Image (cartoon, rainbow, N blue to C red):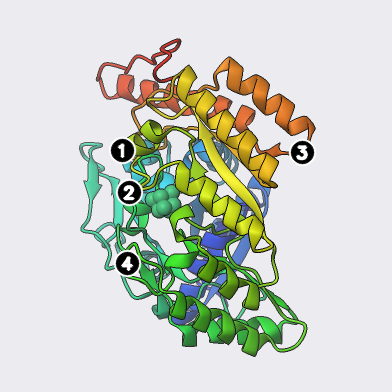
Amino acid sequence: MSGPVLDLVVRYRKGQTYGVHALLAALDVEPPSVPYELHLARSVAEVAARVTAGVEARRRVLTVWSFYSPDAAAMEQELREVRSATPAVPGAAVHLAGGVHATAEPLVTLRAGWDAVAIGEGERTFTSFVEAVATGADWRGLPGTAHLDPATGALSKNRAAERLPLDRYPTFPTTRNLTSPIEITRGCIYACRFCQTPFMFSARFRHRSVASVREHVRVMRGRGLRDVRFITPTSLSYGSPDESPALDAVEELLAACREELGPGGRVFFGSFPSELRPEHVDVEALRMLRRHIANRDVIIGAQSGSDDVLAASGRGHGAAVVERAVRLAVQEGFRPNVDVIFGMPGEGEAEALATVAMMTRLADLGARIHAHTFMPLPGTPWRNEAPGRIADGARRALAVLSTRGGVYGSWERQEGIAAELAGARSAEAGHRGGRPRRLREGDPASTS
Ligand code: SF4
């Protein structure tokens, strides 16, 4: 049998594995027509070594990177290192970026040095791209991709790739021992203005069938795994086309997973990496969950204690429903973990203190608070807003609550990331010749 024609070098980083596993799963379903070798590169040095080996052996080389906006600068630096450490043979290696940042900022990403970007969900685009590079075909016209026009340097963007049913591809590859939580729902009908999910995956739900989920659980069980978790933007929306939960569908899913897992298996639901919307939490739902799931910690998205900020963010619920959800969850034997975001647009001192007051009440009920700082993420309706800053009063309250274990999270680190994102945005506006947006530091309506 002849050796590999293509070296497929995937930058494999902690925190980014789920997306990579989904791509590799797609490659199981639609493999390239010529032999290839996959390298999961856990460092930039490994990427460079694999690229060098491939180019020197005169094989085709494709590197693949996927990252969120806060990592974009670090990945750009890595790509520079790879380019400077590998043989400068024009066209010998193709560097492809995908993920939410590349989708939201294709031009910025291409100017940072990648040859092509995959826009939107990546499975079909990825398998087509791999096939094109592996066979030496032209990849520049592929749906779902963009590149810089060699003559003009302008962005050349192709039509969007087709959005396929979730069952088309598994969540993780079945031919390699790589596992992730099972993606049961993709896309989101809600339109929270800080969130990248709706633009990345569309503003409607696509659900994986119970039969497909069962197949995943069977594979996991065959690997000796006993715990099942899920990826979904809103757990209790499984099976539903709209805002109302479809509890029968959720129960069918959970019961099927338990049956496939057998004795000793554990199903985790409504916990990381998925959460419950507060208006979906009622006694019927909680009792159904108690019958099927192993976790007692659940995550409830609150985001703010201010109705005005919640309305401005498009969350679709108010603050009172959060307190009701927490009360019911505690009553039914769960420990709620409640997500809040400080520094969202429209949040002044009064709104921040409303969130602090809500947090304190929820902590007294037995909840833990997961605190975040607003980041103006590319692609979102709030991408041009000022970076989140935590008001002094809220900062002091967070410190007090954290000493008694009532709050956790990376709100301080995210404050720094938010400022960096806004700085990168201003620099890019300057690069485009536009007027950099002035960050409204000190404006109490937007930075506290
Ligand atoms: S925050 Fe959650 S509910 Fe809101 S749009 Fe994003 S995924 Fe959907």
Which residue: 44% across, 79% down?
249
Query: Which mark, by number, is residue 191?
Result: 2
Mark 1 — residue? 381
Query: Which mark, by number, is residue 137?
Result: 4
Q: CA distance from mark 1 to mark 3?
A: 34 Å
- 405 and 384: which is toward the camera: 405
Q: CA distance from mark 4 to mark 3?
A: 57 Å
Label 2 or label 1, whichever lies nearer to me, is: 2
Mark 3 — residue? 405
Q: Earlier in the sequence, mark 3 or mark 2?
A: 2
- State which quadrant residue 386 falls in: top left
Q: Earlier in the sequence, mark 2 or mark 1?
A: 2
Q: Are marks 3 and 2 in contact (CB under 8 Å)?
A: no
Classify mark 3: residues with Cα within 10 Å, few (<14), some (14-19) or many (20+): few
SS for callout 1 = loop
Query: Which mark, by number, is residue 300?
Result: none
Q: Position of residue 334 (x, y in %)?
A: 67, 60
Which residue: 70% across, 87% down?
222
- State which quadrant residue 151 falls in: top left
